[in-house]
Amino acid sequence: MSKPPPIPGSPEELAAWDALHARIGDLYQTLRQDRRSPQTVVIVPSLSLDPRELRKIAGVWHYEERMLVYLMLLRQPRTRVVYVTSAPVDPVVVDYYLALLAGVPYSHARRRLVMLDCADRSNQPLTKKVLDRPRLVAQIRRHLGGADRAHMVCFNSTPLERSLAVRLGIPLNSVDPRLNDLGTKSGCRETFREAGIQFPWGFERLSTAREIAEGLADIKKRFPESRRAVVKLNEGFSGEGNALFYYEDLSADLSRGALARRIADRLPTKLRFEAPTETWESFMHKYAEMQGVVERFIEGEGKTSPSVQCRVNAMGRHQVISTHDQVLGGPGGQVFMGCRFPADGAYRMAIHESGDAVAKVLASKGVIGRFAIDYVSVPQPDGSWEHHAIEVNLRKGGTTHPFLTLKFLTDGSYNPEDGCFYSESGRPKVYYASDTVQSDRYRGLRPADLIDISVFHGLHFHGPSERGVVFHLISALSEFGKLGIVAIGDNDAQADFLYRKTLEVLDEETSPIGVERAGDG
């Protein structure tokens, strides 16, 4: 009988992890020298987050499809991809991505792709589902084709991913889970402090309602003009772990103790949550468990929410790889809805430099992989901008797959001199992307219907012109009326036009006239 796997978190597992992690640098160097070297990439796109937070996301398992952009790695002729999901992915969706591969016959790419699933749509993280299925783990191992040339890619790295990497005997190209505190709301404030960049005044490592009330009181005393402040769970996702507290008639003239007591009395009924299903009781239970922060809310006419995407490669070298302007929504305007690339030219290089300072600190602590730094930027009377770093997302996020889509489709690169992206042909490229295109009218549209509509109206990405629309979250359309869009153009006007045109087409095709026409076809 084979030796049983080490107990999760045990010294044996940590030693095995460290040995595997040490191989990443050599593997990176080998593949960098020759892109045609044989390799196997195991993609486990698990949102390994608190299941209570996952329940806030409709059809959360469909978010595993955002990483289907990695199927474009199959352009490398000796690369094999093993892609694991909670539930089977419609073959039409897989074919859609493979059709985007330029210069590779479909049959050649398809035979190097293995799609596996757990047949489990529960709200547990995908990686846990895989670990609970030892036969599936064994099946993945059989497809590795040599563990010395294989590695795993994930959405975020937790002890679950560490255990799976050890069981598979392959390294995980991501941050060591022991460093994950650096990506919590509390940890990132400490990183910003070390990097010497500006971030909102506030307090971290809080865990009780009393500490929240005292922190909110201190903010009001220090900034009497403050109208509201933010309370954040350490491990909230996409802004849905945030809540706003409005001071309303509370005056900074009160003593600190009196102000804190009045705030404490109001918290259970006045804290306004970004997640519509959140309650005071459940929020505070999670707050006590995972801790959180209280911060001054940054006000300002014309403020924006840019972000900087960074990468630390397997050799420990850090770099800024893109900037975006985020589109936020939700009750308090803190939920990620989409993004525009690149960030506004008025400040993109300023946040590039700020993000580089953060990336340098994280690299010095041993972080590898992709991550993003979010900002709130406020225009000043003299025409300058003031940038406040808000958080570090120590994982792949909502800006990762749109950028990879652009990079894979155009073979271009980000220019750190001007913060723009240029395709291999030299054209500047931009995009507008969203994960939250949603309408009840879209329910019932199958993946095949969406692709038919896209082709009929000429929306799909066109290689020679390097313009068009790429869809993701396609499988969420039929059940939830929800999908994602990346609209790629040569300038903002083109990208905006393509995005709006896509929405107009979807609305037209799901109208009674459009449905009747489809039936006639």
Image: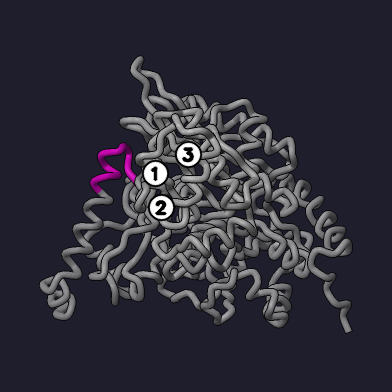
Q: Name above or below for residue 383 compared with residue 372.
A: above
Label 3 sits on residue: 307
**Marks 3 and 2, Cα distance to the nearest angstrom?**
30 Å
Quadrant of residue 519 within the rendered picture: bottom left
**Residue drawn at (61%, 35%), measured in percent from left and top?**
319
Tell me the kind of residue under disc 2: Lys
Across and down, in percent, residue 223 comes to 46, 28
Across and down, in percent, residue 490 comes to 32, 39
Instruction: Classify mark 2: residues with Cα within 10 Å, few (<14), some (14-19) or many (20+).
Output: some
Across and down, in percent, residue 468 comes to 31, 51
3 vs 2, front mark: 2
* Residue that protrudes farthest toward the bottom in the picture: 1
**Residue drawn at (55%, 82%), measured in percent from left and top?**
119
**Residue drawn at (36%, 63%), measured in percent from left and top?**
483
Q: Name above or below for residue 311 compared with residue 171.
A: above
Of 144 and 48, the residue lying toward us: 48
* Residue that protrudes farthest toward the left in the picture: 513
**Residue drawn at (37%, 21%), measured in percent from left and top?**
380
The answer to whether the residues at label 3 and label 2 have Cβ atoms under 8 Å apart is: no
Q: Which residues are magenta?
A: 488-497
Q: Give the structural element (helix, strand or loop) at label 1.
A: strand
**Marks 1 and 2, Cα distance to the nearest angstrom?**
7 Å
Q: Earlier in the sequence, mark 3 or mark 1?
A: 1
> In the image, 304: left or right of 210?
left
Across and down, in percent, residue 359 comes to 63, 35
Of 135 and 101, the residue lying toward us: 135
- The disc placed on residue 246 is 1
468 inside magenta stretch: no
Q: Give the structural element (helix, strand or loop) at label 2.
A: helix
Q: Earlier in the sequence, mark 3 or mark 2?
A: 2
Report the magenta stretch's main SS: helix
Label 2 sits on residue: 270
